[in-house]
Structure formats: structure tokens, C-alpha cells
Image: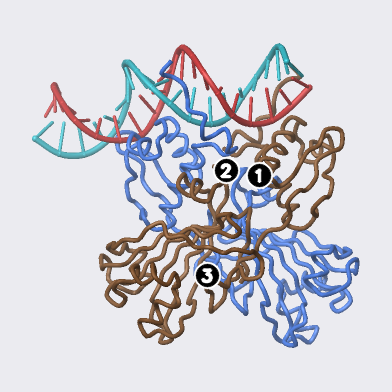
Chain colours: A brown, B blue, C red, D cyan
Amino acid sequence: MTKRPVPSDSHLSGVAIWRRIADAIRLDIVGGKLAQGDRLPAETLLAQRFAANRHTVRRALQALAAEGVVRTEQGRGSFVDQAKRLSYRIGKRTRFSEGLAGQAGALRRQVLGSRLENATAAVAAALAIVPGAKVTRLDTVSSADGRPVSRATTWIGYRDFPDFAERFAVTASTTAVFAQFGIADYTRASTRISARHADAEETALLKLAPGAILLVSEAVDVDPAGRPILYGLSRFPADLLELVV
Amino acid sequence: MTKRPVPSDSHLSGVAIWRRIADAIRLDIVGGKLAQGDRLPAETLLAQRFAANRHTVRRALQALAAEGVVRTEQGRGSFVDQAKRLSYRIGKRTRFSEGLAGQAGALRRQVLGSRLENATAAVAAALAIVPGAKVTRLDTVSSADGRPVSRATTWIGYRDFPDFAERFAVTASTTAVFAQFGIADYTRASTRISARHADAEETALLKLAPGAILLVSEAVDVDPAGRPILYGLSRFPADLLELVV
DNA sequence: GCCCATTTGTGCGTATGTATG
DNA sequence: ACATACATACGCACAAATGGG
């Protein structure tokens, strides 16, 4: 005996202990409890705190080192290498270009593709159109300083806004395209926020470790008269940023 | 040969494949793609869709069955048993009693404990007081229809609001206690939303499977003059509800 | 009742990952 | 680095239940 790993925890979970430890340590770092350059507690102490084996803690530290969050030096300890989480602002006038203003350098939105679709029940309900009606679908990935920070899908009714995709390809600005259609201003009607694990496609596009957690935002923008004009589904890596209302 | 499980995925992730499949299916259900009573695709089809073994899909379905989300019958298939996710509303006048109004029956907030603390840097910054100043800390768990739906910690400055905990114990209403202190109304100044895995304590208190995802909301409430009066940290099971702004 | 296709349930073997000491 | 125990994931095979001809 003496060798039995205690299964009480992990066996119902499907989430490895080392990953939960890594998540907890990362949270201390991005949450400000640990600042850049700070030394982490010794591995034996961490093992004690998380009631896990030192091997398991080391596995967590390896994962964090691979992410560039901590750096481990033999005989010295582990140190915080990269600190804070970005804040993405959400409000009545949420615009892509402003959400991360001042926090990151080069902001870039890349169009993965666009196509015409028939509105699903969810899209139709959000845009207040009949299910099956034609909608423009726009798939994008946004990056800050070269790091992917969001994966967004946007639906716009085709009847009221034909050629949206073509126009967007030119201006690269939602605001500008709506202006061409005579909508000088638009506002956020509602935002629904949830969280889940990333799927395979999101993992690849956002360059995440598989199993990473995403914040998911479902938003409806309306014109000044209150008519829905845009339905957007954005996915953000929860490790990298938080949403501020 | 022919038997090698492909490790390319799971070993970098720390999140089991069956759990990610369960999450994906649950998402289809709470997201409305599958309605109550609908039959899920056959296990072999699901296995194909997720590029996994049927055993692995079955493990995911077992987890969902244990949650009460689906029900499986031999020879017939698996069916959606419980559908929708709750929406917790967040706005300028967010109050506990109103956030889930109309969506659940019996709402209950249980006080786990309260004590005086010295404000940490984060708490002090949020409440605009000096670090180390005395604050009342209140720990609660809220339930809807007997199911725990949130775990909240609240900090209130002691100098301006002494005996907050004692008064709260009597009225069980934040609004009522602030009213006793002459604050007829208060509003939400900011809400920061992030997501992470639950830790051991949260797992126990919210009755979750270990490794479940939490939506974390950090909020600051202010009096009519704009002075911060309350700092709250709420954790919601992401499976169970979404936040609506 | 019988056959049949479909679907879930189960058992065995094997390779690899997780966690401990 | 080594040893141990259990969890995860795969592949194959077959049993059991369902529902329709």
C-alpha cells in the first residue's frame, strides 16, 4: 500500500488536478495577488496548499511556463513572468475599436470569411426577422499585439443591409458600413455572457491549449429607433481578458 | 497496432475528451438547438461528429444523465430531459432579489458567516479606502428552487457602516440595511466578468462536479453621490446560468 | 409470432495519461 | 528515476431492447 493515488477528486471531474492548480496560480497572477517578478511559494508549499503531490504541482508549473506566465529556475524558484489580464469594455456604445483602447498596441481584425445563410431560430429571434430569412454571416478573429483575443461571428439581415460583407471588406468598420446605410449611430440592446470550454476550431484559431475556458458574449445592436440590426457571438479566452460592464 | 489512442489532444489539455463532449452537448441543449424531449443523435453518430470512440461519447452521456440534462433508454436513444439555462440580470440597479425574478420559484440566500477583516489591496481599491482599513466581510450562498446558484463574498467599509453584518442578519436585505444608514438608493458602478474553474470549496458549496466552470462577477455599488459602498465577488456555475447585461 | 435494422448496454484487451510515494 | 494504482480513450465483438414490416 502507501501508493494509492486518491481518486476522490479527479475521477468525477474530467479535469486534471494539475490543470486546476495551473488555473488557480494563473488566477493569482492575473488577479494581481502576485506581481511580475514575484517569486512563487516553493513547490512543496504549493503541494501542501493544493493538497497534491509535488509532481502534480510541477506539472502545473510546466504548463504555466509553456504559456509564458511563469519561469522556473533551478535552485532559485519559480517567478511571475507575465502579469495582467486585459479588460474588454462593454457598454451601450460598444465598438470593436474602443473595447481594448489604451491597453494594447496593435489591434487587428481579420476576416476569416463571409457568406449568406438562412437565419436559424436563434439568429432570427435576435434580429426580429422570420426564421429562414437571408442573413449575412461574418466570421472574424481579432488580435492585440499579434495575440488572438477574440473569435467573433456576426449576423446581419440581408434584406435591410445587402452587400454588407462586400462593404465591410472595404472599410473594415462596422460603424462605417452602417453609416453608408443611413444609420449614423447604433447602440447595444443586450449582452448575454456565458462561459464554456473551447472547441477544436476555437482552440486552433485563438492559439489556445485544448480545454481552455472561453467567455462567450451574445450581443444585439439596435438602431436609434430600437430595431435590431446586428447579432454577434464573440468568444474570448478567459485567461487573457475579462469583460467590464 | 491499430489500437493506439491518439494522445495529440488530451495530453496537452488536462481536460478529458468526454467532458468536452458533455459540455458541447449541454451547450446545444441550453442554447436551444435541442429542445426538451428531443432525441439526440445516435451514439455512433455523435462519436463520428466528435471524432471520438463510442465509449467516450457514452461516458459524456452518463455525465449529462447524472446532471439530469439527458435521459438514455436502451434501444430507443438519448433524450433531452431538462432544458434551459437561467439568466441573471445585471444592470444599474442590480438587486439580489430581482436578478432571477420570474425564472425560478423559491429564492433563498444563506449566510455562511461574517467577520471583520483588514482590507486587502483589491478590496481597498474597489471601496476607495486605505489598504488595511477595517471592512465587514459577508459570505453567502444563494439557491433557486433548492439548487445553489451563486457563491458570493461581499465587503463593506466598517467606518461608514458599522454593524452591517448584524443588521443584515435581521433583515436579510442589503437594500434595507443601507436604507437604515440613510442610503435610499444605490447603483452598480462597474461589473467585471471573468471565468475559471471552480476550486474545492466552491465545488462543495455549489454542489458541482469538480472542474466545473464558474462565471465570476466583481461588482462595485455606489451611493447616489457616487461613493463606493459595497464590493462584491459572485461566482455562478456557468452550466446553470448566464449573465445578461 | 418472426425477422430485421437501429440503438443502447456490456465485456475484453491494450495503450497512454494522471497522480502518488 | 522507478514503481504502483487508477482514469482515460481506443477498437472490436456481442448481447439486449425497441419499433416497424
Please name which of the two marks, 2 or 3, marks the residue nearer to the observer. Answer: 3
Where's the C terminus of chain A, which quadrant?
bottom right
Q: Is residue A75 above or below residue B28?
A: above
Q: Is residue B220 above or below residue A105?
A: below
- In the image, residue B183 lies at what x, y percent? 75, 85
Q: Chain of mark 1?
A: A
Q: Do marks 2 and 3 both belong to one polypeptide chain?
A: yes
Q: Residue at x 63, y 55 (%)?
A: A240
Q: Do marks 2 and 1 both belong to one polypeptide chain?
A: yes
Q: Are marks 1 and 3 in contact (CB under 8 Å)?
A: no
Number of residues whose C-alpha sits closer than 10 Å to that of mark 3, classed few (under 14), some (14–19) or many (20 or more): some
- In the image, residue A151 lies at what x, y percent? 49, 57
- In the image, residue A3 lies at what x, y percent? 73, 20
Question: Left or right of A92: which side holds B127?
Answer: right
Q: CA distance from mark 2 to mark 1?
A: 9 Å
The residue tagged 1 is A67
- Residue B174: which quarter of the image? bottom right
The residue tagged 2 is A209
Q: Residue at x 90, y 69 (%)?
A: B133
